[in-house]
Image (cartoon, rainbow, N blue to C red):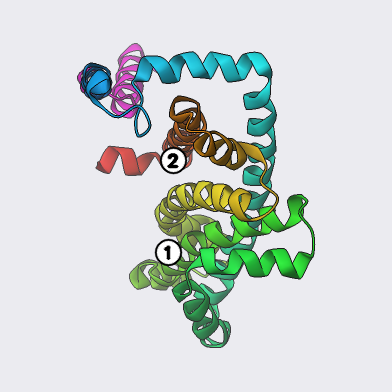
Amino acid sequence: MTVREAQATSAAATVMHRRRRIPASDWIVRIASIAVVLGAWQLAGPMLNPLILRPPSAIFASFFELIGTGELQEALWQSLREFVLGLAIALVLGILIGILSGRSRLFYNATDPLIGALYSVPSVALVPLIAVLFRSFDDPPRITAVALFAIFPILINTQQGVRNVDRDLLEVARAFNSSERRLWTDVIVPSATPFVLAGVRLAIGRALIGMIIAEFFIGLVGLGYLIIKYENVFRIDAMFVPVILVSALGVLMMGFVQWIEGRVAPWLRREH
C-alpha cells in the first residue's frame, strides 16, 4: 500500500468514526432540555401539593435514604433478574417464531391468527391468569409476564423483516447459485436487522412495563413494591425514586441497543 492509499484509508476511517458519533451540539440540546425541565420542576415545587408531587431535590434526598437502608439495591436486583430473564426468553422465542413464520408460508398461516388474537388482548389482563397457572408468587410467573409483554414487538418486527426482504436481491443470489446459508448471511439477515433492532427497542419499554405490573399483581416485590409501599404512606418523594430508576433503565437499555445497532448495522447510521 502506498502512502497516498494509506492516507486515503485513514481519512475514510476518520470520516466513518465521526459519522457514528453523536455531535456535541446534540448532546448539549439533550442535556439542556433535561436541565430546563428539572429547573422548572424545582421552582414550581413549593407551589405544588406535596401529597401529589415533590421537587427533584426531595427525590434526590430520598434516593440516598433508600440506598442507605438497602431497600433500593435489593428491589433493583429483584426487578433486574425478572427483566433480564423475561426479555431473554422473549428475544429467543420472538426471533425464532418470527423467522419461521417469515420464511414458511404454512407456518405463517398456522400461527398468524393466534398471534393476532394474543396481541389484541391487553397483556395486563393476562397477568393474574399467569399467577393462577403457576400457583406461585416466586420469580417464574413474573418472568413469564415480562416475556409476554416483550415478545410481540420482537416477533412481529422479525417476521416483517424476513418477509420484506427485497425480492430482486433474493433472485440475484439464487441466480448465482447461492447456498441457503449464504442467502441468510448475505441477504436475509442484513435486510431484517433494522426490523429486529426496532422490535427490541420497543420490547425494552414493554418489558419494563410488564415487570412493574407483574410486581404489582404477583407477590409485591422489587421496584413495583417500593412504588406501592411509599404511595400508600404518601411518601411521594420516595415513590418517585423507583419510577425514575425504571425510566433511567429504559433509556440506558435503548442506548445500548443503539450502540449494538451501530456495530452490527453501521449502514443505518450512515443512511440517517
Classify 224 as above or below 31: below
Q: Is residue 201 left or right of residue 82?
A: left
Task: Please give the name of the residue rendered at 38% of the width and 14% of the height, measured from the top-left corner.
Answer: 57
Residue 122, x across and y down, in percent:
47, 69
| Residue 161 numbered mark, or none | 1
SS label for mark 2: helix
What is the three-letter code of the residue carrying label 1?
A: Gly
Q: Is residue 179 left or right of residue 23?
A: right
Residue 159, x across and y down, in percent:
48, 69
Total marks shown come to 2
Using the image as rendered, state which of residue 43 and residue 49 is in the foreground. Answer: 49
What span is colored magenta in the figure? 1-29
Using the image as rendered, state which of residue 62 and residue 156 is in the foreground. Answer: 62
Task: Please give the name of the residue rendered at 43% of the width and 20% of the height, measured from the top-left corner.
Answer: 59
Residue 60, x across and y down, in percent:
44, 16
Residue that numbered label 2 is attached to: 261
- How far apart are the alpha carbons under marks 2 and 1? 15 Å
What is the three-letter code of the residue carrying label 2?
A: Glu
Residue 42, x across and y down, in percent:
27, 18
Density class for disc 1 (Cα within 10 Å; few <14, some 14-19, many ≥20) is: many
Q: Is residue 248 left or right of residue 33?
A: right
